[in-house]
Amino acid sequence: MRRTALILILFFVSHWGAAQVLENYQWEWRSSTEQSLVGSIGQKQVRLAVNSFPQSYFQFEVPGNSTVFVDGKLWDLIQNDTTFFIPTDAFKREFGKDSLLVTVVSDKIRLGDFGLAITKVAKNEVEEKKTSEGDQFFALEKRQVVQPLKDFIAVSLLIILGLTAVYRRIYPYLLGVLLQPLSVIKAEDFSESGGLQKVFSFDILFFLFLVSMILAQSLVTGIVIFRPDWIEDWGGISSLSLLLFWVLASFILLVVTILKFSAIKLMAFLFDLGKSEFAHFFYLLRLITFGFTLVLIATTFFVINDFYSLESVFSNLMKAVFWVYLFGVMGLFLLMMNRLNFKKYHLFTYLCLAEIVPFLVLTKWILVLAQ
């Protein structure tokens, strides 16, 4: 008798202050599998009753690398194993329904190691103080950004591919010359016969606009990932607003590119480099085109298949482009040093003024604005 009483006392002491479970949805989960480019991904669904126990909380236990949908809308991206609480009345106010379908997508579900649970609990005062504001309210930015970004990526990619196909149809030879990978190594444009001696013709401007569209796509994606409040202030995050911002940024980058060539031409004139500004400009233009094309492809892949890791992937891609560009400037210095009869310190000064200093200033602005 004493042993039984002691066990009961220990039981109540160990559970003193713990949340009382009102509803347990453990046996109501439905499993399924969806296919993607990276293979099959498991998902589980359960329907939650929102109209009962309005003062209660839903306790979520979600494994890492999971995507949570509520009533068909993306709700949160869970990177690490997480336990959090959401007030039942918050669900009621947000969605205005008596029941909600919750879907959790994760590769751990497919592998059988998931640790997923949702319960409705009545929390005591101590536990309520532990619940942060971020746990009580919805991650609105994440839910509102993903689908517009996916639509923007798809439409902008189709437009870029369509215009590239038109350009290839009209100027097949010129496109091949502009996109020769070996030209980055051999620098054939530095020869008298191989140089592109025109920039402001329609065919070149068309190509520059295509490159500007690729750059603008990465620019818009980066702003949506790191500073979505900018686009919110500009006109709200929607597929249409992202496309309009992208078109505007493409034209601005085209103007900036033309001004960049004009500055290089002026520098080459002041340093008496002859026609080398054409080779200089198109050498780095090829490098930028190849680099940001790879960024576009990688961004599209992760937006479609693995959105929760897009932020870290995009940051690493931008760092890679940064270092590739700097190494490209070093390669340009070596090529110009071998091809041109010019003093090395004058050539180094020319590249610092024309490339390195503006690039580092631009990088500093980006880092400051992204903080």
Image (tube, rainbow, N blue to C red):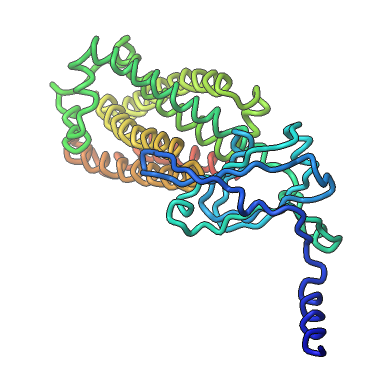
Q: Is residue 114 left or right of residue 89?
A: left
Q: Residue furthest left?
A: 193
Q: Nearer the viewer, residue 309 or 251?
A: 309
Where does the N terminus fall, quadrant-wise?
A: bottom right
For residue 262, say whether it is visible: no
Instruction: Give the answer, above or below, for where 356 lies relative to 83.
Output: above
Residue 67: x and y in percent read 55, 45
Q: Residue furthest right?
A: 125
Q: Nearer the viewer, residue 293 or 341?
A: 293
Q: Residue at x 63, y 34 (%)?
A: 71
Q: Is residue 107 left or right of residue 137?
A: left
For residue 90, say whether it is visible: yes
Residue 109: x and y in percent read 48, 52
Instruction: Give the answer, above or below, for where 256 lies relative to 89.
Output: above
Q: Residue at x 79, y 61 (%)?
A: 20
Q: Nearer the viewer, residue 280 or 141?
A: 141
Residue 325: x and y in percent read 35, 41
Task: Name which quarter of the figure residue 341 lies in.
Answer: top left
Q: Nearer the viewer, residue 189 or 57?
A: 57
Q: Residue furthest bottom?
A: 2
Q: Residue at x 19, y 27 (%)?
A: 189
Q: Residue furthest front?
A: 1
Q: Residue at x 26, y 43 (%)?
A: 331
Residue 350: x and y in percent read 34, 36
